[in-house]
Image (tube, rainbow, N blue to C red):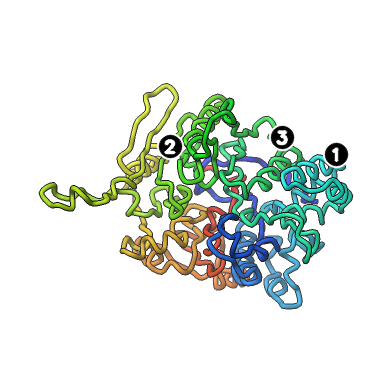
């Protein structure tokens, strides 16, 4: 059971305030069972090596989060946690020695908690079995399974290490997509792909039934389908109501950004705006329509915020290349890049909608008019804005950064040109291994760090097509 947290609240008013509580899911055994023939159906570009992903990559993420958010759980224990004899028990939600932090909150723990209730266990087992076309006998078997083990089964798809009863849900490590905190409300999203249906169901049950969120039940918003959507012909995404958290950014207390992308439809954005305005959650929403390409997927693969006045960004998408002179034949026949230019429209209650010519123009407006910056707004470009490194490094999440506090962000160590761009803009770059050791030895204090890009190992994680912004669902940040 998650330990009591008397300080817990849902309160996110920015992308960069000091991070206090977040929801994560560590790579589970289902990730190690993705086969090549199903990888793309399950939204992966490739199969990953689970042990490497856990021990040499994601575990560093958890340890780093602990030093920033819940240091009492790790300070003085680093060598013990890292020892071979520990067998990673600190990181295993179904193990008695699990960290069980109430600041770095594991979804599997919350699921185990609600499954302790017999009525919830029956309803959720029936719902999962309905989605997965299980037999009635298997449904009864699941109902009678220990809650800790059942939570693991629902997520991994395996009765034990050898017997899979339904598909894994490997994308659950990307907790951002299934819900997002907006001020003191939770917006539960509608993922676009069937592969994410079960994780959406599990998260709904958690938010509506776990005591951690009891005070916020009336503040949980769900994206509905448009009326009689099932009567409309066709399977085109534009006809579906979909919205994923990677397309939602809380940039100031009254301003939300929503991307329309490969995964979020215009209908989904429209329903979100109606919900948010009707419930007085925010007063301003900006829609950013980007090309429906796997390259981009969500707006947080194109840009994220680093400081009030600093953003990391893919330049080749943000500003269209100049048109060719009309007296040149290429101007009449070229496949111009203007088609990839984002469409940006801002909606504010009581005002006429306004448009922005580029992402830079929008983000400059956010920094100056929403966050009160008076100086120059800076843009750190993917790949240092050098072709082909800009596109290559954007693909491996150079723009998908998580701010632990203003100016201190996590990114992958493989994006060398982007690291150069950070250095040119006055940032220190530190390897996570050295950072953790400095924290442990009191040579560095997480609370006093400034203007730092912490470089995380990424060989396997980057193949899953998501960065640390994707792998986090902030529930509480300090106001800025």
Mark 3–mark 2 Cα distance, whole angstroms, equals: 30 Å
Q: Which of 102 and 155 is in front in this view?
A: 155
Q: Residues within 10 Å of mark 3 (few under 14, many from 20)?
A: few
- Note whether 462 is above or below 207 in the view shown: below
Where is residue 273? Give x, y as percent: 50, 30
- Note whether 188 is above or below 199 in the view shown: above
Where is residue 457? Give x, y as percent: 54, 69
Residue lying at the far top in this picture: please name it.
350
Residue at mark 2: 287
**Secondary structure beneath label 3:** helix
Residue at mark 3: 215
- 354 relative position to 410: left or right: left
Residue at mark 1: 119
Foreground tag (3 vs 1): 1
Where is residue 279? Give x, y as percent: 57, 26
Sooner in the amino-acid sequence: mark 3 or mark 1: 1
Sooner in the amino-acid sequence: mark 2 or mark 1: 1
Mark 3–mark 1 Cα distance, whole angstroms, equals: 21 Å
């Amino acid at each position: 059971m998650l330990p009591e947290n008397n300080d817990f609240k849902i309160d996110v008013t920015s992308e960069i305030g000091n991070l206090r509580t977040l929801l994560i899911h560590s790579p589970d055994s289902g990730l190690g069972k993705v086969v090549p023939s199903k990888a793309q159906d399950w939204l992966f570009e490739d199969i990953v090596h689970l042990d490497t992903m856990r021990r040499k990559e994601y575990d560093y993420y958890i340890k780093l989060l602990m030093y920033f958010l819940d240091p009492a759980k790790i300070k003085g224990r680093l060598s013990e946690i890292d020892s071979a004899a520990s067998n990673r028990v600190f990181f295993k939600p179904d193990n008695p020695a699990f960290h069980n932090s109430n600041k770095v909150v594991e979804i599997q723990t919350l699921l185990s908690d609600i499954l302790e209730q017999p009525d919830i266990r029956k309803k959720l087992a029936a719902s999962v079995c309905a989605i997965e076309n299980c037999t009635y006998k298997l449904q009864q078997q699941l109902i009678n399974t220990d809650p800790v083990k059942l939570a693991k089964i629902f997520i991994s798809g395996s009765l034990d290490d050898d017997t899979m009863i339904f598909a894994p849900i490997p994308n659950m490590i990307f907790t951002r997509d299934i819900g997002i905190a907006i001020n003191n409300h939770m917006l539960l999203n509608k993922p676009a792909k069937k592969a994410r249906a079960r994780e959406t169901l599990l998260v709904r049950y958690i938010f509506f039934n776990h005591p951690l969120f009891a005070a916020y039940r009336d503040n949980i918003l769900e994206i509905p389908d448009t009326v009689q959507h099932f009567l409309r012909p066709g399977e085109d995404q534009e006809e579906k109501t979909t919205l994923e958290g990677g397309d939602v950014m809380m940039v100031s207390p009254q301003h939300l950004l929503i991307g329309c992308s490969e995964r979020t439809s215009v209908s989904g954005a429209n329903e979100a705006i109606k919900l948010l305005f009707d419930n007085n959650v925010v007063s301003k929403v900006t829609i950013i329509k980007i090309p429906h390409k796997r390259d981009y997927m969500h707006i947080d693969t194109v840009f994220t915020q680093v400081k009030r006045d600093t953003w990391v960004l893919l330049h080749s998408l943000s500003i269209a290349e100049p048109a060719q002179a009309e007296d040149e034949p290429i101007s009449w026949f070229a496949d111009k890049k203007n088609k990839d230019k984002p469409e940006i429209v801002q909606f504010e209650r009581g005002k006429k909608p306004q448009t922005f010519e580029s992402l830079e123009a929008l983000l400059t407006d956010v920094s100056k008019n929403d966050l009160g910056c008076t100086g120059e707004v800076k843009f750190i470009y993917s790949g240092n804005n050098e072709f082909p490194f800009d596109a290559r490094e954007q693909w491996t999440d150079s723009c998908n950064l998580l701010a632990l506090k203003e100016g201190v962000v996590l990114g992958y160590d493989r994006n060398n040109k982007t690291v150069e761009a950070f250095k040119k803009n006055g940032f220190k770059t530190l390897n996570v291994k050295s950072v953790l050791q400095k924290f442990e030895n009191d040579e560095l204090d997480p609370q006093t760090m400034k203007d730092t890009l912490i470089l995380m190992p990424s060989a396997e994680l980057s193949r899953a097509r998501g960065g640390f912004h994707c792998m986090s669902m902030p529930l509480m940040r300090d106001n800025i």
